[in-house]
């Protein structure tokens, strides 16, 4: 089920999500702005689709090792070490997020057929059905700018919210030979 959301603002946009009791979203700890009192916050080291989430069995040591691996990958990208998870109780609730820098926000409805990659700090929030991972892009990509070495990787079915500093320009790579090159800084 798609989460009802509204993007507000001109240049420094914010997204307000209405969560029904059966819906939840997770976000990087730095993007949460405000919520209604019936929306709960839980901090977790694991992300959706991770080995820690998928494998509830296997013992304490296996779970701790998987969680440590996830935290280490996020630490390499400069992201917060844990995710904040939000869920409404006693009816619908509201939660608001914004990006790190003034800029625009895009809501992406993922159908499971495409994987999205985003620069670090672009991730705002996603439904619990969207898997988060880190993709290594190679040292040569971001050697000078300090960016672009690691990308955030998203897959699954549901709503993904990304932000960009400034104005976002939408380009379909299919219209230009299937690929585009992006400066990571």
Image (cartoon, rainbow, N blue to C red):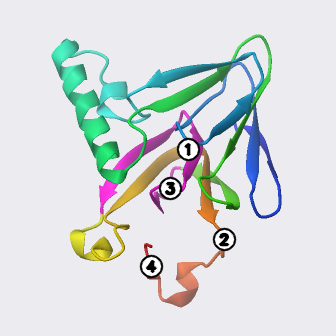
Mark 3–mark 2 Cα distance, whole angstroms, equals: 23 Å
**Main secondary structure of the magenta stretch:** strand
Instruction: Check whether the beta carbons of the residues at disc 4 and disc 1 lie within 8 A of each other.
Output: no
Residue ID at (31%, 27%): 52
* Residue 27 location (% of width, % of height): 55, 38
> Magenta part of the protein: which range?
112-136
Mark 2 vs mark 4: which is more N-terminal?
Answer: 2
Instruction: Check whether the beta carbons of the residues at disc 2 and disc 4 lie within 8 A of each other.
Output: no
Mark 1 vs mark 2: which is more N-terminal?
Answer: 1
* Residue 125 location (% of width, % of height): 59, 42
Side of 172 where 47 appears, left or right: left
- Disc number for residue 157: 1
Mark 4 vs mark 1: which is more N-terminal?
Answer: 1
Mark 4–mark 3 Cα distance, whole angstroms, equals: 26 Å
Side of 53 where 17 appears, left or right: right
- Disc number for residue 183: 4
Residue of label 2: 168
Above or below residue 138? Residue 15 is above
Q: Quadrant of residue 64?
A: top left
Mark 3–mark 1 Cα distance, whole angstroms, equals: 8 Å
Side of 65 where 46 appears, left or right: right
Residue of label 3: 113
């Amino acid at each position: 089920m798609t989460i009802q959301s509204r993007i507000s603002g001109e240049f420094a946009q914010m997204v307000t999500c209405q969560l029904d009791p059966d819906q939840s979203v997770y976000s990087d700890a730095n993007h949460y702005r405000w919520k209604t009192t019936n929306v709960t916050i839980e901090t977790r080291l694991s992300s959706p689709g991770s080995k820690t989430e998928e494998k509830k069995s296997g013992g304490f040591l296996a779970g701790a090792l998987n969680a440590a691996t996830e935290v280490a990958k996020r630490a390499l990208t400069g992201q917060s070490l844990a995710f904040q998870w939000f869920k409404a109780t006693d009816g619908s609730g509201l939660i608001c997020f914004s990006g790190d820098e003034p800029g625009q926000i895009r809501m992406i409805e993922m159908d499971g057929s495409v994987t999205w990659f985003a620069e670090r700090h672009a991730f705002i929030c996603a439904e619990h059905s969207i898997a988060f991972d880190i993709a290594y892009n190679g040292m040569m990509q971001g050697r000078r700018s300090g960016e672009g070495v690691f990308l955030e990787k998203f897959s699954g079915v549901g709503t993904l919210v990304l932000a960009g500093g400034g104005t976002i320009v939408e380009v379909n790579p299919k219209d230009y030979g299937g690929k585009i090159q992006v400066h990571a800084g």
